[in-house]
Amino acid sequence: MVLREHALKLRFWPGGRGGQSVDINWDWIHACGHLGIGELRVEDTIGGHNNLRIIFFKPDTDKSSPDAMPLIWILRVLQKKTQSFMQNEIVIFKARRALVMNYMRNQ
Amino acid sequence: MGPVIDKFERSVGPKTERHSVEMFAELLKWQKAYDSASPEIRDIVDTMVHIINDPTADEEERLAAIDTLEEALFPTFTNGEYGIPLDDTFADNKGIPLIDEAARRNEKIFARKVKAAMKRRGMTQAQLAKKIGIGQSAVAMLLSRTCRPQKATVGRIAKALDLDPNDLWPE
């Protein structure tokens, strides 16, 4: 529930190339940032877990309606254990993004 | 389809007579879903099965791959798991309390004490925002309880206002 609270801050999408808006700390994931996949870093320890990351996907759909709130999808929440994401994790992020894209196409 | 059967056997465990009918029915369901899936979805399923069977993958990766595989074959998108449009989760707030009562109390205390301290110091939202390195609108949202602050932000605000962080946000 607390994580959802933090994720909701993504509504106030700062745009650009990472940084801070509200008090969120986020960045594009190096291996898949070009696909619109980023990570929101949660600084608080929640349920005994630290180093939590909310993996999100922001489709590039804002150009047609620049004033609209951005549509952002939560792909995964995990505890980051290594400096960089593992290859399997990246593959899973991309697969989940593909499922979201597939879902959006079928809407 | 072989990989999907492998996945299926992993999820239901070893075959036993007791479960054989259920397993067969379940297997047919998976087979049908896979057969009727688009090539793109089949690719995703195959990739996830590869991760599930990867000896270097850890348990979390396997579980995430299983979740993704199931979502690919049996999409839900509204069950509270991943892939929810953020606006929908926000809309939940209208009917479902997202924040526990203790957190609500803390938010109230936080907003009241920060406002009082700002007033005592004659500090504007813009000045506080500049001091702690976030935007003025972010401070406004924190004070109006539109957003709950992270602990690090509470700490920065406490420092900027010369207050005890535990006084601002009781544990």
Image: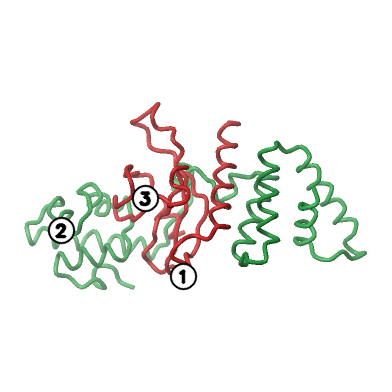
Frontmost residue, B74 versus B169: B74
Residue at position x 26%, y 51% in the image: B144
Q: Is residue B125 left or right of residue A51?
A: left
Question: How far apart are the two marked residues, 3 and 2, measured between alpha carbons?
Answer: 21 Å
Residue B33, x across and y down, in percent: 76, 42
Packing grade of label 2 (10 A; few <14, some 14-19, many >=20) is some
Residue at position x 66%, y 39% in the image: B40
Chain identifier, green in the render: B
Disc 1: which residue: A49
- For this orientation, the residue located farthest to the top is A64
Disc 2: which residue: B131
Quadrant position of residue B168: bottom left
Question: How far apart are the two marked residues, 3 and 1, measured between alpha carbons?
Answer: 20 Å
Q: Between label 3 and label 2, give the one nearer the viewer.
A: 2
Q: Is residue B29 left or right of residue B69?
A: right
Chain identifier, red in the render: A
Circle 3: residue type: Lys
Which disc number belongs to residue B7?
Answer: none
Residue at position x 54%, y 44% in the image: A97
Does residue A48 sit above or below A10 in this rendering?
Answer: below
Query: Are the two marked residues, 3 and 1, in contact with CB atoms closer than 8 angstroms?
Result: no
Mark 3 lies on a secondary structure that is: helix
Q: Earlier in the sequence, mark 3 or mark 1?
A: 3
Mark 2 lies on a secondary structure that is: helix
For disc 3, the chain is A
Question: How far apart are the two marked residues, 2 and 1, measured between alpha carbons?
Answer: 29 Å
Frontmost residue, A37 versus B80: A37
Disc 3: which residue: A9
Residue B115, x across and y down, in percent: 17, 58
Quarter of the picture containing the C terminus of chain B is: bottom left
